[in-house]
Image (cartoon, rainbow, N blue to C red):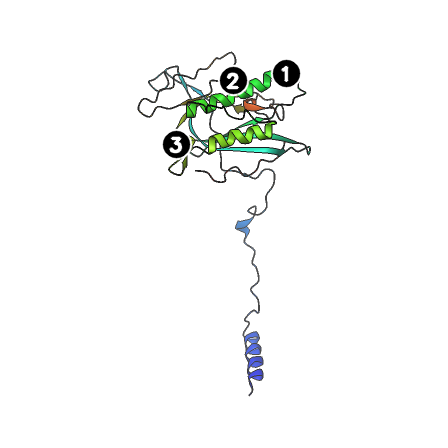
Amino acid sequence: MNSEETQKETVASAEVKGTPKTAQPTSNPAMGGIFGISKDTKASNNAPIPVVKKIEPNDTYPTGYEFPIATLVNVVADPAFKRKDGTTAATLTFIFRDKDKRQHMHIEWEVDPSDAKFKDKADWLNTRLAHIYSVIFGQFPAGGIGTTATNYGEYFTMMADAFNNQVVEGKKVYTQCSLFLKLVYYKDNLGFPMSPNFIEKINPTTPSCKQLAINPRYDKLQATVSKAPAGMGGSMGGELPGELPDLDKEFE
């Protein structure tokens, strides 16, 4: 018997014995509801950092309010963030994470020059950025930061570089300190208040929160039903008018 006849006989023998040519998928009732994704599918494991909580005063929180503790882990500038309506806007994003991997993203948006309150809003934005920078680093560079920018895309890129380029032993300086965060509600949007103080650097030897305070008239610790207006700038937050890029890249 030649080799071709031997191969044919082997195949025929296998078919007689019931050996399947190809494995067929089988149905498992226990797998029902496992497959498929939708708008209701959980899309992230990053739970939000919680709101400030009222407690009995103690050495760490002498004012009687417990401010969550987190670390700034990334600063990202996007000169042309694409909105859902197709327009673009410059953004500067600060990402904070706590020891339980919960996350808060503080996003500053470029201010529209045609806005009737442009000067005020631009000043508030600068004040928030100066607050974050000075709390973490202390002193400003002699020439300031972003003073040569001609638009918000350039300005936010210079700001991000000012944070990210300060590195010691291969690690970004801002990732090496812990911060108290003042997170309060605007409607149902959790974020920093419009103006400082909203972060405080923790002294490892005497961790006491003394620079942050809650004014019950303005600082809301519970959400309301209505959502914040879409695209509101800065720490007032609002719903994002588009999809954020991957901001987890190059965490230190």
Quick check: 243 left or right of 73? right
| Residue that carries the numbered disc 2 in the rendered image | 195
The residue positioned 52% from the left and 33% from the top of the image is 76
* Mark 3, secondary structure of its residue: helix
Residue 30 x %, y %: 52, 50
Quadrant containing the N terminus is bottom right
Q: Which of 13 and 174 is in front in this view?
A: 174
Work out how far the residue at label 1 is from the one at label 2, CA to CA, in angstroms. Answer: 16 Å
Q: Which of 5 and 248 is in front in this view?
A: 248
Residue 174 x %, y %: 42, 30
| Residue that carries the numbered disc 1 in the rendered image | 117
Quick check: 230 left or right of 219? right
Which mark, residue 176?
3
| 123 in relation to 106, above or below | above
Work out how far the residue at label 3 is from the one at label 2, CA to CA, in angstroms. Answer: 25 Å
Q: Which of marks 3 and 2 is nearer the N terminus?
A: 3
| 226 in relation to 243, above or below | above
Which mark, residue 239?
none
The residue positioned 30% from the left and 24% from the top of the image is 205
